[in-house]
Image: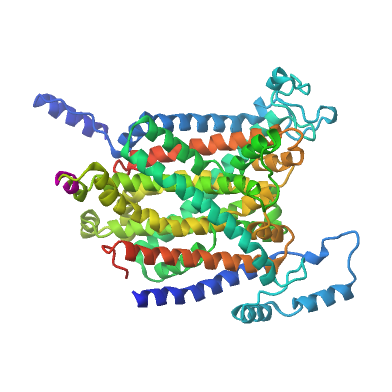
Amino acid sequence: MLRYVVRRLLLIIPTMFFVALITFTLAHAAPGSPFDRNVNRPLSQETIDRINRYYGVDKPIPEQFVTYLGNLVRGDLGLSFTRQRPVVEIIGQGIGTTFQLGAGALAFALAFSIPLGIISALKQNTLLDYGSMLVATIGTTIPSFVIAIFLISIFGVGLHLLPFVGWGSWQHMVMPIFVLGLGEGAFLTRITRASMLEAIRQDYVRTARSKGLRERAVIVGHALKNALIPVATIIGPATAALITGSFIIETLFNVPGMGRLYVISILQRDYPTIMGTTLLYAFLIMIANLTVDILYGVLDPRIKVR
Amino acid sequence: MATAATTQQQRAAEINVTVRKQRSLWRDAMYRLVRNRAALVGLIVIAFAALVAIFAPLIAPYDPLEQNGPKQLMEPIWTQFFGSKFTDPAYILGSDELGRDILSRLMYSSRVSLIIGLVPVSIVLVIGLTVGMLAGYVGGVVDDFLMRVTDVVYAFPDLLFVIIIVATLRGTALGEAYDGLLIIFVGIAVVNWVGVARLVRGQVLSVKNREFVEAARAIGAGPGRIMRKHIFPNILAPIIVTVAFAIPGAMLTEAVLSFLGIGIRPPTPTWGVMINDGFLVFSTTPWPVLLPSLCISIVLLAFTFVGDGLRDALDPRSKM
C-alpha cells in the first residue's frame, strides 16, 4: 500500500512536467505579445526590449522554460504580465474564495443527492423515482451557465431578491453555490441510486432480511453501508470538478476566485498566470484521483491495490 | 443471403415448424430504443433540429446578419399580451440589440451546433479507435505511448485544456479559419480522443482472448482481419454509447467557448455567441439570452435522453 502511494506520488512529477511543457509551448506558439494590444499607440522598440528583459522573455524559449521549471520547484510562478505582481500572490488571493464556493457547493450537492438517490432506489419505478431522475437528468445536462441565467433573470433581475454580482454576504453566495452544486449533486444522485439498487439485490441483504432484522436495520446497516462506497470514492473527483469547473460560475457572478482569474488571464493573454493556474488545477486533479484510488482500497477490502 | 433464407423456410415447411423471424442484437436494441419514450422524444427533437439546420436558408424569415436599426430589441410577440409595447409581428421571437431577427439567428445557430457535434466527434472516433485497437491488440510501444499520454491529458481539466488550446491559438491562421470553427474542432479532438482510445483498449483486452477470437486465429485469420471482423463488432456497443454522449459534450464545449468570447467569432450566429451578445442588454430585456439558452438546453437534453436510451438498449443489465 505504502509503495503504491509513493509510486503514484512520484508519477505526479513527470506528469506535471508535461503539463507545464504543453502549456508553455502553446503560450509561446501564440502570435504577438500581451504588450502590443494598443494598435494606435505602439510602444517604442526600446520600451518593448526593456519590458521583455524585465519579464525574461528576451531569452531563447528553451532557456526560458528551464528557468521557469527551476523557479517552479522553488514555488515561484513568475510575475503576472498585466497585474505587476507575483502569480503566487494573485492565486493566493483567489483560491480561498474558490474553495469557499466549492465547499458550499459540495455540501449542498451531498445534502440533497444522497437522500434523493436512496429514496428513489427504494421506491424504484414510482412517480417519486421518475421525478427525481428527471430532475437529476436535467441537472446533469443543462449547462450551469444556462441555469444561472434563468436564476438571475428570475431572482436577480425580476424579483430583486438576490444580488448576482460579487461575493461576501450569504445573499451573494446563494445562487453561485446552488448552480455549481446542482450539476454535481444531480450526478451524485444518479450514482447513489444505481449503487443502492445494486446493493439491495445482494445476497447479504436477503440474508439480513431473512434472519428477521427490521427493514430499517437492513437498509441502513447492510445495504446503505455498501452502497455508499462508490459514492464516497466519487467525491474526490467531484471536489476536483467543482474547483476546476467553477470558472464559468465565477465569471458569470463576478466572484473574485481562481476561476475568474483564469478566464481573465486567458482573455488578457497573461501567460504566467495562465501557466500557474493550469499547473495548480492539474495538481489538484491528480491529488483528487490519487485520494480516490487509496480510498477505494481502504473502504472496500475486496479491492486489492496493485 | 436470399437463397439461404428460402432454403431455411423450405426446410421449415418440409418439417412443418414455423421459423421465428431472426432478430439480430442491433434490431433488438433499436426496438428497445424506440420503445423508450424519452429516447423517442429525443430522437424526434434531434431530427427536427437537423431539418431546421439543413433548411435554415429556406425557412429563416431573415438573413441572420441583417441589421434593422429602428427595430432593435423587439420582444417576442406573445409578450404583448403581458403589456409589452415593443413587439412587431414581423419578428416572431423579437430582435436583438442590433435589430437582427432572433428566430433566424436561432435557426442558423443549429447548423454550427450540429457540425460541432458531428465533425470533431468523428475525428475523435477515428483516432481513438485506431490507437485503442492497436494498443489493446498489439500492445508494445503504442500501448506505452497511449498510457503516458493518458496520464498527462487526464491531469488537465478537460474543458480548461480546450480553452487553453483555443485561446492561445486564436490569433494564428488555424484559429481564424472558418470563423474559429476549425480550432474548436482541433481542441475538442485533441482532448477527447484519449478517452475513446482508453475505452477501446480496455474492451479489446477483455475480448481478445475469448474463444471466438482464438477460433478465428486458428483458421488462419491475420491480425487486421481479426480486429476488423471479429473484435470490432463485439466492442461496438459501449463505443456507440460513448459517442452518443460525446456529441452533446462537444456542443456544450462550443457553447461555453462562445459564451466566454473565445469560440466562434461574431457575427456568425451560434447559441453561445447569441448568449454572449445578449448579456449586454440583459437588464433591459432577457429574451436575446433566454431563447438561445432554451434552444441549447432542449437539444442537449434530447441527446442525453437518446444516450441514456442507447445505454439501456445495448446493455440491459445497467441500471443507471
- Frontmost residue, A142 versus A116: A116
For residue B187, side relative to residue B308 (left or right): right
In which image quadrant can residue B197 be found?
A: bottom left
Q: Is residue B47 magenta?
A: no
Image point 77% across, 30% down: which residue?
B73
B137 or B82: nearer the viewer:
B82
Q: Quadrant of the C terminus of chain B?
A: top left
Q: What residue range appears in magenta?
A: A207-211
Q: Nearer the viewer, residue B42 or B7?
A: B42
The residue located at (79%, 78%) in the rendering is A54
* Rendering quarter of residue B52: top right
Q: Is A125 placed above or below B261 here?
A: above
Q: Is residue A209 magenta?
A: yes
Residue at the spot 33% in from the left edge and 57% down from the top edge: B204
Which x, y percent locates residue A46? 89, 76
Residue B214 quadrant: bottom left
Q: Is residue B60 above or below residue A107?
A: above
- Residue B109 seen in the figure: no
Q: Could one spot residue A263 in this view of the protein? A: yes
Q: Is residue B284 left or right of residue A24?
A: right
